[in-house]
């Protein structure tokens, strides 16, 4: 086998693996969030992640991919939804005849001969990013929103927010390294794997919706505790594992950048978990499992935009800073009075903003502390602010429209009685049935 052919197969294998790892992150989020809610709402929480997977997959196949990556750029903000509609730019039948039922090998990618790997693999990799991003939003809305409204929101938000944002940052658009803002400032904006596209974007959207739909019954009055902390820890560990595909996969090949992104991700995440734990110990006297899980996610979020450009030392410093800042930020909702149920703003918003901006200080050769000047910092702040503005405006329009039509919330009685019964017609745990069975066996 020729070396270049072997390299292509190796890259293809790595990118398919990375896509699968990132797909696993959404079930990881489901466990992470599911453990944090009360027992009467856990099934609904898991279902919101399931909807994020399924609705996004359909929208991405229809027009999401085209808006983000396939179509010609319109104003540097979004692509033409028709060019890649139903993936026609990426996957076609050989000889124009679809006979996959009789010959599964007949359906292929139009870019099988590309140097790195087939374009169809990139479609698969990118859809998993869209899935996890919209799933993150659900944590802020826990225990009070209708499943039907959420499904429609996912479709609209992927279409009008996520896909255009991905286009702007990762497809030579307005916020990219060769976009208008970078050109004007004289430094290339950097978002390796989603500080703006994923984390700032999702957190701002979450905050906007929370302000529109209001607080849960009893928020700030009575304690609302997680019902299953082991679920939370399992979710955090699954996210850490999946994040290797998220960050190392963003090297788009089985190469040295992927290897370094794997290592910087681990170093930053470990530092963030420890920093969160030490902060918590000083404040409360305990190292909690909830704190460890949250610290892991904070570190993963913060290193995401910077995984390929910060040295090992600065990766750990960045992670530690994020761990401390996010730990404090999660308490702001009680002081400011917004019910971000599972701290999407405190972890993903603050963590994503921290990682994006700190590239301006720690980015190798461009950051203020790593051989560069102020321009990198300026462009990082500029793209972060643009992401906040775009996400806030688009999400507000979608969320207000849904509030005035379908309505976001279940009734107060349904919320108090348990959204699982109200929306899913099921319970996660049949304690009464279990007790009854035991009694029958004893008799």
Image (cartoon, rainbow, N blue to C red):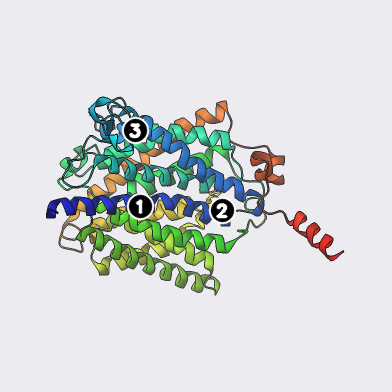
Q: Quadrant of residue 261?
A: bottom left
Q: In this view, does 270 lie above or below 90?
A: below
Q: Is residue 121 above or below residue 402?
A: below
Secondary structure beneath dot 1 equals helix
Mark 3 or mark 2: name the one nearer the start of the chain: 2
Percent coordinates x, y for residue 295 in the rendering: 44, 64
Q: Is residue 425 above or below residue 9?
A: above
Q: Which of 288 and 227 is in front in this view?
A: 227
Left or right position of 115 against 294 = left
Percent coordinates x, y for residue 27 in the rendering: 48, 51
Residue at x-position 25% and y-position 62%: 259
Q: Name the residue under label 3.
A: 100
Percent coordinates x, y for residue 234 in the rendering: 50, 62
Say which quadrant the C terminus sits in: bottom right
Neighbor class of circle 1 (other Cα within 10 Å; few <14, some 14-19, many 20+) is: many
Secondary structure beneath dot 3 equals loop
Neighbor class of circle 3 (other Cα within 10 Å; few <14, some 14-19, many 20+) is: few
Q: Nearer the viewer, residue 434 or 137?
A: 434
Q: Name the residue under label 2.
A: 34
Q: Is residue 145 visible?
A: yes
Marking on residue 353:
1
Q: Nearer the viewer, residue 328 or 197?
A: 197
Secondary structure beneath dot 2 equals helix
For the residues marked 2 and 1, what is the alpha-carbon distance in whole angstroms? 25 Å
Residue at x-position 22% and y-position 46%: 117
Left or right position of 267 against 343 = left
Say which quadrant the N terminus sits in: bottom left
Left or right position of 421 against 8 = right
């Amino acid at each position: 086998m020729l070396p270049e052919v072997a390299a292509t197969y190796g890259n293809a294998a790595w990118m398919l693996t990375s896509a699968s790892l990132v797909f696993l992150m959404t079930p990881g989020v489901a466990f992470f969030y599911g453990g944090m809610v009360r027992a009467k709402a856990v099934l609904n929480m898991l279902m919101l992640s399931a909807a994020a997977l399924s609705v996004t997959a359909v929208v991405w196949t229809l027009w999401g991919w085209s808006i983000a990556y396939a179509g010609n750029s319109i104003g540097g903000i979004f692509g033409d939804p028709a060019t890649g509609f139903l993936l026609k730019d990426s996957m076609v039948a050989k000889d124009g005849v679809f006979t996959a039922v009789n010959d599964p090998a007949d359906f292929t990618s139009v870019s099988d001969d590309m140097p790195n790997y087939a374009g169809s693999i990139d479609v698969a990799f990118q859809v998993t990013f869209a899935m996890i991003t919209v799933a993150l939003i659900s944590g802020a809305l826990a225990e009070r929103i209708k499943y039907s409204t959420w499904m429609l929101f996912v479709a609209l938000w992927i279409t009008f927010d996520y896909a255009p944002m991905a286009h702007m940052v990762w497809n030579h658009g307005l916020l990219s390294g060769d976009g208008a803002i970078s050109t004007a400032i004289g430094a290339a904006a950097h978002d390796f794997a989603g500080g703006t596209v994923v984390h700032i974007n999702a957190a701002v959207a979450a905050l906007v919706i929370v302000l529109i739909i209001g607080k849960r019954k009893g928020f700030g009055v009575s304690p609302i505790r997680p019902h299953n902390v082991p679920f939370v820890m399992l979710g955090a560990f699954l996210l850490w594992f999946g994040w290797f595909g998220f960050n190392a996969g963003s090297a788009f090949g089985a190469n040295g950048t992927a290897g370094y992104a794997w290592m910087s991700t681990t170093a930053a995440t470990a530092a963030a978990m420890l920093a969160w734990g030490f902060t918590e110990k000083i404040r409360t006297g305990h190292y909690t499992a909830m704190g460890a899980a949250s610290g892991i996610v904070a570190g993963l979020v913060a290193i995401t935009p910077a995984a390929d450009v910060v040295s090992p030392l600065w990766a750990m410093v960045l992670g530690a800073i994020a761990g401390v800042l996010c730990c404090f930020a999660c308490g702001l909702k009680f002081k400011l009075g917004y019910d971000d149920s599972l701290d999407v703003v405190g972890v993903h918003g603050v963590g994503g903003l921290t990682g994006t901006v700190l590239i301006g200080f720690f980015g190798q050769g461009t950051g203020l502390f790593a051989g560069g000047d102020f321009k990198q910092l300026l462009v990082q702040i500029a793209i972060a602010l643009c992401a906040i503005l775009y996400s806030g405006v688009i999400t507000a329009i979608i969320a207000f429209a849904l509030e005035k039509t379908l309505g976001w919330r279940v009734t107060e009685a349904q919320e108090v009685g348990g959204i699982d019964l109200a929306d899913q017609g099921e319970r996660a745990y049949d304690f009464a049935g279990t007790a009854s069975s035991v009694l029958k066996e004893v008799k």
